[in-house]
Amino acid sequence: MSAVPHLLLAIETSCDDTSVAVLEDGRTLRAHLIAAQDVHRLYGGVVPELASRAHLELLPPLVSRALAEAEVRPEQLDALAATRAPGLVGSLVVGVAFAKAYAAALGVPLVGVNHIEAHLHAATLEHGESPLPAVALVVSGGHTELVEVRGFGRYRWLGSTRDDAAGEAYDKVAKLLGLGFPGGPVLDRLAAGGNPAAFAFPRPMLDRPGCDFSFSGLKTAVVLAVAPHGAPPHPEPLLADLAASFQAAVVDTLVSKAMRAVDALQARALNLGGGVACNRELRARLAVECGKRGVTLRIPSPRLCADNAAMIALVGAWMLARGDEPDP
Ligand code: KG4
Ligand code: ZN
């Protein structure tokens, strides 16, 4: 076992957020910056080529600002971590290439971190070590994963989406309702004023055993429900009912499968991660279900749910402490 690096700089560029963090002793965030790329709003979704170019522009000044906020000079850094995969290839390359050059110039080790593994542990930054065994639910624009966690590096995949990710379903439904991008926050807000029983949308895969998900049929059901009402803009009450009914179907599915996993494994904690973990209905329903079972529900604050370099820093620090070989 090596020691946790004293000062570690982490870089996350897997999708459309450019983020940099400085973590001290594997615990204390000295700086954590996230630059969202607004350019994608114009296109109703993330455009990979534009994301890479934006990372290229945003990353160097963001690193300088993070170091300034942390009051750390580059030569004081002991290690670097960067998101290695999964993600948009062009975006990942920008972060990894920058990190490699920076680490080489400073003569410090660099580790490549798996983005999903980082989401699994994001809650630890604020809530401390998770009771084990735990189940992690990672729900974002790119992923819907249920994972058994028995310790750092000890995982078993329980289920994932067979088609659209949960956040992707939110984004696609918002787009077809003319509500812009990203869709999650606006549908979440609208749903609060609507009737979740107004439309009987399907609960995909709930009738099947296991923990896999499928959200593309649900999206089609929304297309069919809205068709008689013509093209957007739609009146607010209709949008609210559609949002509430759609959200009820997504949340029912996520909560049922997560609880199926918790019960099967007798898990002591449920750890949430990913942008969809910001969803108010999902948080509330999981709180009730975990409460009934005496299971600890650990939800990061919104900044740590979405893509961020703090979680990359945490896992990078643990990897180096475990003695993982740094990248050449
Ligand atoms: O983790 P994230 O920032 O990026 C990745 O996709 O990896 O997650 C973004 C996703 C988007 O699909 C967005 O619509 C969704 O998270 N999202 C939400 C909410 N806030 C963000 N979905 C449902 N309810 C929300 N409040
Ligand atoms: Zn993510």
Image (spheres, rainbow, N blue to C red):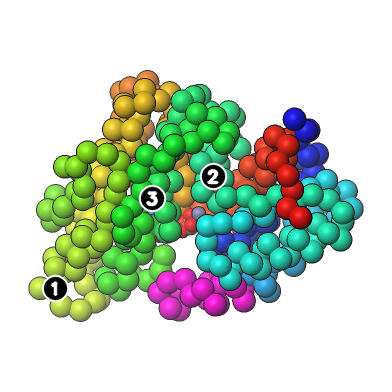
* First reached walking from the N terminus: tag 2 or tag 1: 2
What's the amino acid at mark 3?
A: Thr
Residue occupying the point 70% across, 34% down: 322
1 vs 3, front mark: 3
- Above or below — where is 172 with respect to 230? above
Looking at the image, the residue that sits furthest to the right is 75
- What is the C-alpha distance between the residues marked 2 and 1? 40 Å
Q: Compared to 33, does 58 lie above or below?
A: below
User: Residue tagged by mark 3?
Assistant: 144
Q: CA distance from mark 1 to mark 3?
A: 28 Å
Q: Position of residue 321 (x, y in %)?
A: 73, 35
Residue 33 is left or right of residue 70, and the answer is left
Instruction: From the viewer's perspective, tell me whether residue 210 is left or right of residue 72.
Output: left
**How many numbered tags mark residues here?**
3
Q: Amino acid at mark 1?
A: Ala
Closer-to-camera residue (163/234): 163
Question: Mark 2 or 1, which is nearer the eye?
Answer: 2
Q: Dot 1 corresponds to which residue?
A: 227
| Mark 2, other Cα within 10 Å: few <14 / some 14–19 / many ≥20 | some
Name the residue at 28% across, 65% down: 173
Determine the residue positioned at 55% across, 51% down.
Answer: 115
Residue 34 colored in magenta in the image? yes
Residue 122 visible, this angle: yes
Point out which mark residue 117 bears.
2
